[in-house]
Image (cartoon, helix red, strand yellow):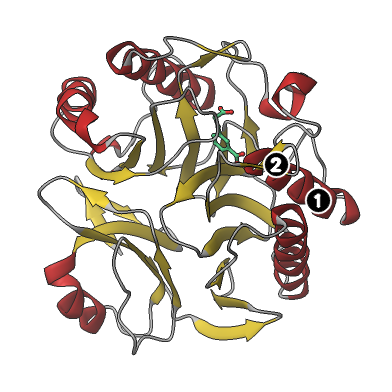
Amino acid sequence: MLDVEGAAYSSPISSEFVLSRDLPHYLAEHEGHVAAVIAFGQEPPSRVSAVRLAVAVPQLGPEEFVEVWHTATPVTYGCQEGISFCRNDEVMIGGLSIPDVGDGAIAQLACDAYRHLLDVAMAQGFPHLSRIWNYFPAINCETGGLERYRQFCIGRYQAFAAHDYPLAGELPAATAVGTLAAGFCVYFIAGKHPGRQIENPRQVSAFLYPPQYGPKSPSFSRATLTSWNAHARHLFISGTASIVGHETLHSGDVQAQVKEMLTNIDVVMEQALGDVPAPGTLEQAALFKVYLRHPGDLDVVLPALRAHLGKRPRIMCLQGDLCRSDLLVEMEGVVPLLGES
Ligand code: 3EB
């Protein structure tokens, strides 16, 4: 139970960016309630019964964090079909990690991973994906005549289609970022009830992108608004970049890409929450991750984000390749909210 500005906030699941050096203390304090420990550019602690992932996406900047998801009521841990998961009565978080995928067939890999995770989530009673993160190597490399990100989109689509997943109305918010090492990692949050899918009126929905971006359009929504109960919601904002319509804008100009990206973030928030800031919006508890193709751009990007978002939200800065080779920067957000939609 968190107490934010005097209000009882009882989300079944919460996330934090915990300073790496504070992690042992944090885990001890939340024992039995830690659902996932996602370590970017580092190894997760070994002795936790939770979804533990090491993502080969290095952190930039002076402070090193670990992304931790914890739950209000105790979680149980399980592992099936290569998917490790933690769940309680209200929420499930799951993940998988394949240590070395080399430059192998990424479409098949993505299809198998998604089929397994959908199987396991459904079998556990959590058929509605709210949020999913995808990390794999050499995302912009072409093999067999097709960029690996586009191959990934084919496999992901096939798995959703095989499960009759509602492809226009209930896609999860997502991130897909290239790693610097050989592993393939996916993690997700799933619920018992569907969230609300949010699209961005400035952008063509990704699942409707024209074929010039690949044979299968990417299966994700711009954001999802998930109500857990009468008191707590989450807005999960997908990886958001300098795309307007379906085109990348400001190729080669990181400063202009950041500005465009922030406009897209604002529009997605407005679509989800309305013009007037929702009462009880916990902006100060929002978490953002920003991915840079070139680590040297941090000096330009971070001050621009701080100027826009203020001092409060935590920002994790990461180095990763983005799904289009002309994108230099992308950001995602997790915004905990009070109240019903
Ligand atoms: C875009 O808007 C940028 O394929 O899961 C952002 C977030 C992007 C998620 C995905 C891709 C994905 O098209 C790329």
User: Which quadrant would the C terminus be assigned to in this image?
Assistant: top right
Residue 59, image x, y percentages = 25, 51
How many marks can you see? Answer: 2
Residue at the disc numbered 2 = 171
Mark 1 or mark 2, which is nearer the start of the sequence? 1
- Residue at the spot x=39%, y=13% of the render? 260
Residue 79 appears in the rendering: yes
User: Which quadrant would the N terminus be assigned to in this image?
Assistant: bottom left
- In the image, residue 51 above or below residue 198: below
Note whether ligand 1 is within 8 Å of mark 2: no
Q: Secondary structure at mark 2?
A: loop
Which image quarter: residue 333?
Answer: top left
Looking at this view, is 220 or 170 the one in front? 220
Residue 155, image x, y percentages = 77, 51
Residue 141, image x, y percentages = 58, 41
Q: Which mark is residue 160?
A: 1
User: Is disc 1 surrounded by few (<14), some (14 to 19) or many (20+) residues within 10 Å?
Assistant: some
- In the image, residue 134 above or below residue 280: below
Answer whether labels 2 and 1 touch (C-beta < 8 Å). Answer: yes
Looking at this view, is 206 or 103 the one in front? 103
Which image quarter: residue 13?
Answer: bottom left
